[in-house]
Image (tube, rainbow, N blue to C red):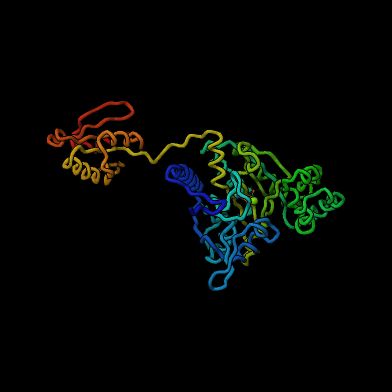
């Protein structure tokens, strides 16, 4: 037997309605905020991610699906959404669009990770990207959009915010941090020992217990923000308060990617254990320039849809089924079945989901089947009904039965 590759999953017919529910909410909320969809290719030239995500990140160092194609080009399956969109922004001259440019995406992502609950090798992200505004109000708008969306799904989360400053304030902070960590390197994990020289900020994000203990007393980035960055952070907090969005400040949040500046945030759920971060985002003012474009600011977030569905399942959110069959129509005998076939075509053309028999089942088995697929109404055409141009229709929930004229059937079911 051939199985799916490790860390990947089928989305089966019995659960796809959950995905559709989430995707419909995404489309509804983004419309309210004037955010338009962008779709970019599933794979990119590898440089998009080595430049755009950063070569000191876990994603680029350990997790990418990279291969040479038959033309000897280095290709990578996208591990996240932002870098591809920044590439597209530059390539398509979006700097000439009316600013800010607000986009969202729903995309598969690929990361070579150790699969576990809420951690897959192929997963899906919903994300928002806004380019062209330096104002803290847009950081707030992104956060509010994400919060509105999570609220609408019935997912309770905690919002954690932080500012990691700009290149300038980070320089001073990195020195202070290294100063503090230097004498404690011994107790830190191998990854953090490596980060110490390459990207000390990322040590704050480490999940290893030894490192966590050491980090507790580390200096706070918030004490090192320059005037501009601290004004921006104050403004963000004010906008969030105006929107009545509750938050906690967590100066240990730095996010996994290299391109962040100023605002960083996470939405965390306590219902799925260690993989609790449902959504992560922030501001990335240097990204477009890093990828060869102009000096254009960016801000956005990404959330994992599988993780979101897992949280929803764990907290018992009921998702309304949109894949229900309205009408099962059954003909007793050959002529009657042909009539059912014909009527079904007309009903579907008019928006009533209708099923008929294709398995040559007995009448009894058909009733059983109609029950199994949860049909809202079941119609029967026997010889009497055929002769009189009616259908006997039963409403399954109430048991109410009624003979309905064929010409009134559509109206009755609608
Ligand atoms: P984590 O700390 O859990 O590894 P991350 O910092 O790598 O997350 P991001 O790169 O910010 O995550 O991606 C945004 C969101 O995508 C995460 O908050 C999470 O919901 C989801 N996500 C990330 N990696 C995976 C994965 N391997 N499987 C499923 N969802 C994922
Ligand atoms: Mg990760």
Q: Give the farthest residue toward the right.
A: 183
Query: Residue at position x 21%, y 32% from top?
Result: 392
Q: Give the farthest residue toward the front.
A: 1
Q: 301 above or below 241?
A: below
Q: Position of residue 345 (x, y in %)?
A: 24, 46
Q: Position of residue 29 (x, y in %)?
A: 49, 44
**127 vs 369, nearest the viewer:** 369
- Would residue 255 be found to the left or right of residue 342 on screen? right
Q: 85 above or below 72?
A: above
Q: Give the farthest residue toward the bottom.
A: 71
**91 vs 124, nearest the viewer:** 124
For the question of whether residue 341 can be seen, the reply is yes
Query: Residue at position x 19%, y 44% from top?
Result: 338
Quarter of the view holding residue 378: top left
- Would residue 399 be found to the left or right of residue 61 on screen? left
Query: Residue at position x 56%, y 64% from top?
Result: 44
- Would residue 43 be found to the left or right of residue 193 on screen? left
**91 vs 210, nearest the viewer:** 210
For the image, the number of numbered tags is: 0
> Which quarter of the image is occupied by the C terminus?
top left
**89 vs 370, nearest the viewer:** 370
């Amino acid at each position: 037997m051939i199985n799916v590759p490790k860390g990947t999953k089928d989305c089966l017919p019995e659960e796809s309605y959950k995905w559709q529910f989430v995707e419909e909410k995404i489309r509804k909320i983004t419309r309210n905020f004037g955010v338009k969809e962008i779709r970019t290719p599933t794979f990119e030239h590898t440089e998009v991610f080595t430049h755009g995500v950063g070569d000191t990140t876990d994603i680029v160092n350990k997790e990418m699906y990279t291969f040479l194609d038959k033309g000897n080009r280095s290709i990578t399956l996208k591990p996240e959404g932002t870098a591809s969109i920044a590439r597209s922004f530059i390539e398509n001259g979006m700097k000439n669009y009316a600013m800010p440019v607000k986009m969202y995406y729903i995309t598969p992502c690929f990361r070579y990770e150790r699969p576990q609950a809420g951690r897959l090798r192929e997963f899906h992200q919903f994300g928002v990207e806004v380019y062209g505004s330096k104002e803290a109000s847009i950081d707030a708008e992104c956060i509010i959009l994400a919060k509105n969306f999570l609220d609408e799904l019935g997912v309770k989360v905690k919002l954690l915010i932080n500012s990691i400053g700009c290149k300038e304030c980070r320089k001073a902070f990195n020195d202070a941090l290294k100063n503090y960590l230097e004498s404690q390197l011994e107790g830190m994990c191998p990854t953090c020992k490596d980060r110490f020289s390459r990207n000390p900020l990322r040590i704050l994000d480490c999940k290893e217990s030894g490192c966590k203990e050491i980090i507790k007393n580390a200096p706070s980035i918030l004490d090192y923000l320059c005037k501009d960055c601290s004004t921006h952070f104050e403004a963000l907090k004010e906008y969030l308060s105006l929107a009545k969005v509750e938050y906690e400040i967590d100066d240990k949040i730095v996010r996994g990617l290299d391109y962040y500046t100023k605002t960083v945030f996470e939405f965390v759920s306590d219902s799925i254990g260690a993989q609790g971060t449902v959504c992560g985002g922030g501001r990335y003012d240097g990204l477009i320039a890093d990828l060869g474009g102009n000096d254009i600011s960016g801000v956005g977030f990404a959330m994992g849809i599988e993780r979101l569905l897992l949280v929803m399942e764990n907290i018992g959110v009921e998702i309304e089924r949109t894949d229900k069959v309205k009408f099962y129509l059954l003909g007793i005998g050959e002529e009657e079945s042909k009539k059912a076939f014909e009527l079904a075509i007309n009903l579907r053309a008019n928006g009533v989901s209708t099923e008929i028999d294709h398995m040559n089942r007995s009448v009894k088995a058909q009733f059983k089947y109609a029950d199994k697929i949860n049909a809202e109404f079941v119609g029967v055409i026997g010889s009497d009904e055929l002769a009189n141009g009616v259908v006997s229709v039963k409403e399954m929930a109430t048991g109410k039965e009624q003979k309905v004229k064929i010409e009134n059937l559509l109206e009755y079911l609608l």
